[in-house]
Structure formats: C-alpha cells, structure tokens
Image: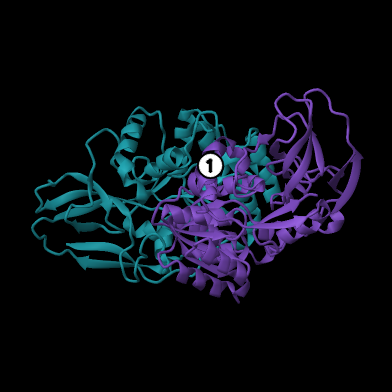
Chain colours: A purple, B cyan
Amino acid sequence: MNIDRVVLAERPKGEPTKENFRFEKVETPKLQKGELLLKVKWLSLDPYMRGRMDGSKSYAEPVSIGETMQGECVAEVIDSQNNGFKVGELVSGQLGWVSHAISNGKQLRKIPKSNIPEQTSLGVLGMPGHTAWVGLNKIAKASPGETIVVSAASGAVGSLVGQLAKKKGLRVIGVAGSKIKCSYVTEELGYDGCINHQSVASVGEFKELVARYCPKGIDIYFENVAGITLDAVLPNMNEFGRIAVCGMISWYSGKGLQEAMAFPKFWRTVLVKRLRVNGFIIFDHKGSFPEFRKEVSPLIQSGEIKYKEDIRDGLERAPESFLELLNGGNFGKMLIRLK
Amino acid sequence: MNIDRVVLAERPKGEPTKENFRFEKVETPKLQKGELLLKVKWLSLDPYMRGRMDGSKSYAEPVSIGETMQGECVAEVIDSQNNGFKVGELVSGQLGWVSHAISNGKQLRKIPKSNIPEQTSLGVLGMPGHTAWVGLNKIAKASPGETIVVSAASGAVGSLVGQLAKKKGLRVIGVAGSKIKCSYVTEELGYDGCINHQSVASVGEFKELVARYCPKGIDIYFENVAGITLDAVLPNMNEFGRIAVCGMISWYSGKGLQEAMAFPKFWRTVLVKRLRVNGFIIFDHKGSFPEFRKEVSPLIQSGEIKYKEDIRDGLERAPESFLELLNGGNFGKMLIRLK
C-alpha cells in the first residue's frame, strides 16, 4: 500500500502558488511493535501553515524543503501493534497533509463516540475553537457589557469568538469579507452587526462605520487579519481596551504592507489610551483544552453554538484550497475530506 | 503682592520654542474662608507637559491658550484661612508654573517633616518615582532572574526603575544619551550596563550592542523614548516579553517619525513572540501611592537608592529648561527652584 503526501517543493516568494507544493507516493513501512497505522479521514487547513512555509523560524520550526506539510487530521486506526489503540477507533493529531500515517500513539487524542461529527475535532471543538475560547477568556478577559470587534468573523476562530462573547453578554460586531458572510454572521451566529470590508471605499469610511456600529467604543479587538481593519478599529478603541493578537492573515504574504498605518501613531494610541496588546499562540495553552471542551461540547450538541464547514474532497485539492483560504475564499472552517 | 506665572502663549508647531510661553504678573486675590496662600519653592518639569501644549485631547485636557502651564510644585503655606493647614507647613500639589497660588487645600499632599529633602516629593518620592514603581511592579510584573532594558536610564523615572529592578534580582541594562550619563548609570546606580545611543552609528549596530549586553534576551522593556531605541530592543525581546509603555519622548514633537519601524514588522513580533504591550499613565494609579512611599522612602533615607537632580534657579528659566528637558539636555530630575 502507498501513502500519498504533499510536500513543500519550494518556499513561496510572496503569495504562495500551487508550484510550491509537490505530490509524492511512498511505500508504507511495516508496523513495529507499539505502532499503529492510521487512515486519514479529514485534514484541517489553517492560516498558521503559511508561516511554516517560510524559511525563518517563528514560534515553530519551518517545514523543510521536501518535507511533508504540517496539519492536524482526524484519522481511523486501521492496523495496530499498540495495546492502547484498537482498529476502528478515531483519533486526532498532527499527521500532516497525508493519506495515511504511522504513529506511536503518543501525540494522538482519541475522539469520544458521540453524535457530534468527528471533524469538529479540527474546528469548533479543536484547535480553532480552543483559540477562540482562550483569546476571549484568558487573553482579552472579556466582561459582560463590553463591546468586542472580531475580524474574520465568519471564519473558524472568529465565528466562535463572537458566539461565546454574545453568551457572555457583550456587544459583538464582526468584520467579514462579503455580504453573504456578513448575513451569516448576524443572522445565524447572532452578532449585533457585521461590516463587509469589501464594500468600504476608504479607511476613513471604514473608521466611521466601525464608530457607528460601536457607539460606546471598543473594549476588545480580536485581531485575525491586520491591514485596514486594524486601522479602522484602533481610533475607536476605548481607554484600557485590549487587543488579542491571534493572526494577521492580510499581511502573511507581504501584501498590503505599504498601506499599513504609521507605527508612531499606533504607539501613541497605546500610551494615551493605556491599551493592553497581547500576542498569543494556542500551542502555549494546551492545559486548558479539557476545560474548553467541557464548556463548548454541550453547546454544540444542543445546537446553541453554530458552526460552518467548507469541505473539499480529495487530498489533491489541498494546495488550491489552502491558497483560497489565504485569500478569504473559504466560507467556514476549511476541511479536506479524504476518500 | 503679585503672582508671577507662565502661560501658554501659542501652540507649538513641531518642536516648542520660548515664544510658545509668556510671563505674566497678576494681583493676589484676597483669601476667602477655607483658602490658603502658598509660596512655591520648587516646580517640577516633566516630559508629559509637552502633550498638554497640543490642542488635541489625549488622556487629559490640553492647556488652553493664555492659561497657566500645568506642573507639580512643592510650596509653603504663607497665609491660611483653612483650619487644616498652618503657616509654615510644606505641601505638594498641581499648582502650575507660578510663584504663588491660592488653594482650598483639597488636592494638596502634606510633606512630612524628615531629613529627606522636600523636593524629592517631585522626583524620586513623587510622581516620577511612583511611575517607575508602578511600571516595574504592576505593569511589567518583573521577576528575579529576568533581564530588563530601561530607556532614558539616567532620568527621573528610569534611574529608579533600574535600581528597584536590581534590588529585585534582575539583570538591568540602561540606554542613555551621553557617555557621562552612562557612567553615572553603571557606577552610581549599579546597572549592569548602559548603552550610549549617541555613540551608535546605525540601528543595526545598536541592535547588536543590545544583543551583546543582553545575552539571554530581554524580558522587559521599560519604554520612555521610542525611536531607534525601540527598533534596537524589539528584535531582542524574548518570548512572553513585556513592554511597559510609559513615554516616547523622541517622538513628542514629531521628530524622527519618518525613520520609525514598519508597523507590520512590529505586529508580527508581538504575535510570534507572544509579547504583552501595556500603555500606562500614573494618574490612574493614585491608590498605590502610599504603598510606593512606604517601600521607597526608607531606601532613600538609608542612601540605598540614589537620585540626581538638575536644579535651575528662578521661574524665568522654566521655559528654556523645559525645552532642554525635551532634548535630553538635563541630567537627573529637572527642577526649578524659586526665590
């Protein structure tokens, strides 16, 4: 049997292209004692993967040229030489952009049997959901009555941030990249409003729109995108406001950097408004995962919290789907379903 | 009797000039019941006053054109219709750039009799000292074994930050604007090192110098100046580092703004290194003043903590002295001693 995998063929110069990836087939090695063979059912595509494609070390080592692209998967045990895992069990883990994987079981999480779809372990009940929960509760320390603005509001992280914030009693305003996404955010997710950044003609108009949607100013900005959204949000921040810096997708490939705000203006706002700005990365917060699951799982089960998936079929579509994700072409959590 | 005072004659365009100020004499009004007449002995000059000269509201209302410049003073009660104050008592308070003032006593602090010089109530035991203490302990949350970099290290705030940090068991590196200031910082204040930013030829060289002085990276940056110092510090910040944003004197009059770092680079560092950046203003922290005084007064009394004053004689020298302060021309806490 062969394993299909997608490797990094070359480092992107600016925006990634399909040529940066290469498909390979390798033979499945024989299982050793303690190992198990996994068949991947779902692969998660997430914006952080863009950073791993660059050569420079950030918080994690980059993917080397010729190495398999990293990614979380849901997989089924199809052979096992490990007493801890039985054939037929479902697990999630960092297996990469692959059809099958061999594992010693150490970094895997078992997915409990329930009526919740298994792939939520990659989305609303997985890393993106945990990111939303940590950012809102541990980083921004949201309180009832405050106003929060969430960028990429219909995305895997943003859609949960806003719903949890609403449940907590905050005023919640989203920013998203199309009219359809904005309708979903307000009508399905229950946000108090959503601004379509594709429809604004200038940063000035954007600022005024934000001000109109946030008549009491902004206490928390959940930052996923940077770019002109940050520009429009910053002057509307309240004194003692918090910015949870989770991502900056609009700048990942060097686009829009020229139009970024002047740094001294930002620095002055931080001082004058006594802002707290906090970068965070979910991999530092593994300890709170059980608490997060315990709180959010029942809300998914009951349908109180909604989520949306953007499912593409076949590993061969992973590169093009990932490029779409970076440009906001997805609508909901981007997932690859493997045959 | 006349009161001498310095008023804001016009708003500065960029760097302030002496023409922005005007001297006036006004007649002393008759004391009403509950009031006291104060003779100012010391006037404090501080960088925050630059912000009050601009028309735009920041955290405090600006000084209006024709209004007395704001400032903290140490003064002696020379007449009193208020049972709470006796002639001869010393007080500190926000009286402005004046020779005398009438007060109802409400916003005044009595200066207890001790062998500590009275004017320390404007410096190391006053607002600047309290700023240092709050920034280090409450904002940056310094811990033993960490490395802190303090800009404007020989100034009223910086000189205390570093000494308190040393006592706490941190490695302390200063940045100051002359060879003499740096010698003072290391030899008198006991910093582990001090970089003279006037001697660096480029930002690149500055970065390397900071790296050499901080072999384990920087956990805390106490920001007083912004500009190229911030540029040199940022790439040397450790993961989970904190930046306490207290001031940005090099940008107060619009100088050097063009050379500021690109905002996206900063934002990426905040995310990748999970930095916490916190603006703070001492006027929000009045509640902790007694705790600060209780901790630091004995250290001043015993000589364990050192301080330096830059004393100029005569209210007429206030404008020129203030302009010097903005350009780093002071060496120690800038004070005007009145006749």
Residue receiving disc 1? A292
Name which residue lies at 22% across and 67% down. Answer: B26
Left or right side of B56 for A8 = right
The residue under the point 62% across, 59% down is A225
Residue B254 in picture, x, y percent from top left? 54, 64
Residue A257 found in image quarter: bottom right
Q: Is residue B232 visible to the viewer in this orientation of the structure?
A: no
Would you identify the image quadrant in which residue A232 lies? bottom right
B80 sits to left or right of A264: left
Please tell me how crowded label 1 is: few (under 14), some (14-19), or many (20+) other residues with Cα within 10 Å: some
Q: In this view, does B25 lie to the left or right of B333?
A: left
User: Residue B219 in the image: x percent, y percent?
Assistant: 57, 38
> Quick check: B225 left or right of B271?
left
**x and y, in percent, of residue A211 in the image:** 47, 69
Name the image quarter holding residue A150.
bottom right
Q: Quadrant of the N terminus of chain A?
A: top right
Whether residue B316 is visible to the viewer of this picture, yes or no, is yes
Instruction: Pick whichever, A177 or A266, lies toward us.
Output: A177
The one nearer the camera, B332 or A242, is A242
Amino acid identity at mark 1: Phe
Secondary structure under the numbered disc 1 in the rendered image: helix
Relative vertical location of residue A164 with respect to residue A108 in this rendering, above or below: below
Name the chain letter of the residue that bears numbered label 1: A
